[in-house]
Image (cartoon, grey):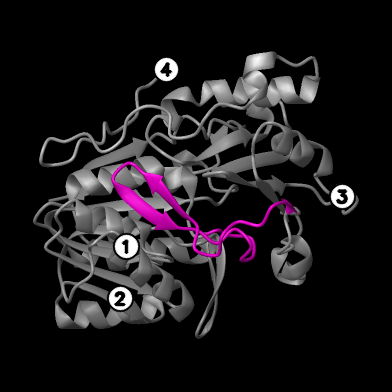
Amino acid sequence: MRPPFFAWTARDGSVTSKGDTVPPPESFARGSSDALKLRLEAAFERRRVVRAYTEAYRWIDDAADGFPDLTVDRYGDFAVLSLRSDDTGDTGAAPAEALLRLGVRGVYVKRRPRSDLRREKHGELAPQKPIGESSPSDLVVREGPFSFGVALADGLSTGLFTDQRDNRALVYESSRGRRVLNLFSYTCTFTVAAALGGARETISVDLSKRALARGRENLERNGASGPQHRLIGADAFDWLARAERRGDRFDLVILDPPSFGTRDKGTFSVDRDYARLAEHCFRLLAPEGRLLATTNHRKTTSDAFRKVLSAAGRSTGRTLAELRPLPTPEDHAQRFDGEPATKSVLVTVR
C-alpha cells in the first residue's frame, strides 16, 4: 500500500495528527453475518492508513468496493451517500441504514444521475433532511494540519472534495515563500494549504461570492487570514485577461474548474474551454513556476489531458521542464473505462 503523501509533521517538528481519528464501527467487535455490513466493514478497514490523518475520506468508492454506482464520503461522524443512477426509485435507504448501524450518526443521500444535472431540480437531488441525525451547521473536519468547514445539507457539494487531499498536501509542501493563484477556488481549501505551507501571498478567484465567504471562514479558522490572502469574486477568464495586461506573475497556479459551470457570459465546459484557461495560466507563470492542473471530466482521458496541457504550453511559447501525472488518493481507486475519475498533472515551466 502506498503511504500517505504527507506525514503531517508541523514545521516546528510537532506531530499534528496520528492514529485513527474515527473509531471503528461498533460491529467490528461483535462480528456480523450481514453481507452489506461486511462489505462496508471491509472497505472501512482498507482505509486504515487514510483514517490515520484525516476525518474526511471516501469510505465506499463505487465498484472498487463492491458497490456499483454508489459512493460514501465520511465527514467526522456523518456520511454523504451518492447514487450515480437514473433510477428515481433508488433512495439509498438500505446502505444508509447499514451505515447507521455501524456508528454513523447521520447519512445525507444525494442523487447524481447520468443525465444533464442542469435540467434537474437540485432540491430533489440533494434533500436537506438526512437519514438519522442532522449534522451541525458549523461542522468542521480535520485533514492533517487543516480544519475545513463542511455543509452536508447544502446541495450536491459539501465544500470539501476528498479526492483533492493529496493535491492539497502537494500545495502545502510547495508554497513556502511563493506567490500562489487559486482559480475556481470554491471554499479555498487549496488556499488554506498554500497559506499554512508558508506562501507569501495568495489570490483566490471564484465567481460565487457565497463560496468565497466560506473560503474566508476556512482561512480564519486556520489562522491564515490577512491582507496577503486576497479573495476576489470574478469570472476567471476576465480576471486572467486583466492579470495578463498587468503583467502579473505567479510561482504556483492551481487550476481546478468544474466539468461544467456557468459564467457571467455563458457557460464553461472542459471540452471547449480548458485549453484556453491553461494558456492564460502559462502566460502568468514566473520562470520555474508550476501549474497544478486537475479535472474530473470523465470523458477526458489522462493522455488527452496531458496533450491539452502540452499544446497549451507550446502555444504560449513556454518550455515545459516537467509534465508529471499525479496519483489519486488511495480511497479513490475506482476507474471508469480504465481511467481515474480525477486527473491531475503538475507542470513546471522554464
Q: CA distance from mark 3 to mark 4?
A: 36 Å
**Cα–Cα span, label 1 and label 2:** 16 Å
Determine the image quadrant of residue 61: top right
Q: Depth-wise, is mark 3 or mark 1 nearer the camera?
A: 1
Which contiguous range is marked in magenta? 131-158
Q: Earlier in the sequence, mark 1 or mark 4?
A: 4
The mark nearer the N terminus, 2 or 4, is 4
CB atoms of marks 2 and 4 within 8 Å: no
To which quarter of the image does residue 188 belong? bottom left
Tell me, for residue 87, which label it has, or none: 3
**Amino acid at circle 2:** Leu
Badge number at residue 1: 4
The answer for how far apart the CA atoms under marks 1 and 4 are is 33 Å
SS class, disc 1: helix
Decide: few, some or many residues near mark 2? Use Cα within 10 Å; few <14, some 14-19, many ≥20: many
- Badge 1 crowding class, 10 Å Cα cut-off, few under 14, some 14 to 19, many 20 or more, is some
Q: What amino acid type is highlighted by mark number 1?
A: Arg
Residue at (56, 70) in percent of width and height: 261
- Identify the image quadrant of the N terminus: top left
Q: Is residue 12 left or right of residue 207?
A: left
Q: Where is mark 2, residue-wise?
A: 231
Q: Nearer the viewer, mark 1 or mark 2?
A: 1
Other-residue count near label 4 (Cα within 10 Å), few / some / many at <14 / 14–19 / ≥20: few
- Residue 238 percent across, percent down from the top left: 36, 82
